[in-house]
Image (cartoon, helix red, strand yellow):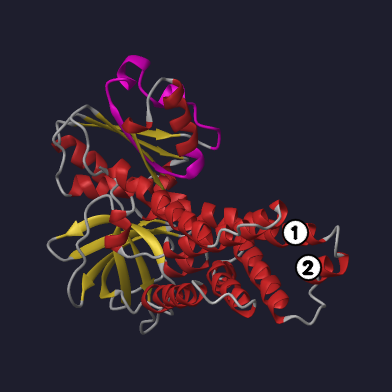
Amino acid sequence: MQNLAKLSAPILSLSFVAGLVLWAYPEGAAPARQIGIILGWVGCGMLLASLFLALREPRLTNLLGGVENMYWWHHRLGLAAYVALLAHPLLLAGASLPKAPQEAWELLSPFTESWPVWMGWLSLLLLMAGLGATFATRLPYRIRRPLHAGLGIATSVGLIHLLLLGIDEPVEPLLLASLALLAWRFIREDWGVGASPYVVQSISRVSPNVVEISLAPLGEPLAAKPGQFVLVAFQSGRRFKGCCEFHPFTVSSIDGASGLRVAVKALGDCTRNIQSIEPGVPARVQGAFGEFLGNPASTPQYWIAGGIGITPFLALLRAGRLDRPTTLIYLYRSEGDALFVDELNAIAANLPNLALRLRATGDEPIDPESVLPPGEDVAKAEFWLCGPPPMIELLAGFLRRRGLTNRWMHFENFGAL
């Protein structure tokens, strides 16, 4: 069922794009012009689909295979749209070049004093800024985030470009839809209007650069489960100045019927600032998202965690849910990077189904042979991996070479959340 949900995002997106192309198919035009027009509509449709997949509504994410699956398609549709829209004016100009060179130049030149051409170029430039921010991971979040918003704005500007060319249908309803999606994303999600109010109840220092924060709801609590993550924006308190940005944190514990805990590692400006948070600080929480650790098979389980990737497994262990043989392999660089080790040892001592393996890897690359079980055990088990993307890629590739299919591997790509 989950695999079918993951296919729904590309199926819906490509069906929408195909519908636009069929509606606007330019019959009777020269081949180069036909392809240029089709690519324009393909790019427009992909941008709209990409904008739709950027929404973070929990019910929607469950229907479309999870927020990570939606973002995977969101990024790739945005990149494909850029390629299509870049080729769109080139092909149109190429179709006119042999018979009307001046007309071909006017189609491309931003100096023609033509509003349609200017808006087309502006849309492409905004799209380039948004895509550049996606890949420029070293840019500070406060700069990268507004630049990435250029993808959404480029969609509306591109549709205005079509209106200026005299194409009213179906552009007018599509423009209204794009503006509605942008407003929904910025107002309800980025600005936190749709978030639930919580307050910091207590803070526990886990390591020099990790704190675990207990949050209590001020209204209706979120229905979070172990293995899920939430988006949290911490506001300002009496002595704490919050960055007020929504960041993803895996739920490390479900406290009773309403409270929850998240572990925050100092990875950037905002998360470093959160290390000094105090009780009483208000927070806005969105979610919960994800289905990691949901619906395990009846086979033996292998949980492999790297660094702070231990948190979803810890949440499930704290909830006391372990009804099949499970091996938890916890990898960390040094003893100072190991989190919740004393608690994990105490839990393992009281859970006969749990085998705990702690492993300090140092700065050298991980040797999968020394971490993963022998080949005959791999074929009989289900694997769950959570940690830095390089670790997941290395271990998942090794398991595939051992013959394990994706049906028996589950990932929480902590770096992508």
Residue receiving disc 1: 90
How far from the left and from the top, in percent, is residue 60? 31, 61
Circles 2 and 1, Cβ within 8 Å, touching? The answer is yes
Q: Secondary structure at mark 2?
A: helix
Residue sitting at 71 percent across and 55 percent down?
A: 30
Quarter of the rendering containing residue 110: bottom right
Residue found at x 28% / y 25%: 381
- Please give the residue where the numbered disc 2 appears in the rendered image: 108
Q: Residue lying furthest top in this view?
A: 376
Query: Residue at point 43% right, 78% down?
Result: 183
Question: Is residue 62 part of the magenta span, yes or no?
Answer: no
Q: Position of residue 314 (x, y in %)?
A: 26, 47
Mark 2 vs mark 1, CA separation in Å: 8 Å
Residue 304 rendering spot, x and y as whole percentages: 35, 36
Asked if the stretch drawn in magenta spans residue 388, the answer is: yes
Where residue 353 is drawn, which disc sits there? none
259 or 343: nearer the viewer: 259
Residue 216 lies left or right of residue 71; in this view the side is left
Q: Is residue 20 above or below residue 236?
A: above
Q: Camera-side residue: 395 or 269?
A: 395
Q: Which residues are magenta?
A: 363-391
Rendered-image quadrant of the C terminus: bottom left
Q: Dot 2, how many residues are within 10 Å of its Cα: few (below 14), some (14-19), or many (20+)?
A: some
Based on the displayed image, in which of its 4 quarters is residue 212 positioned? bottom left
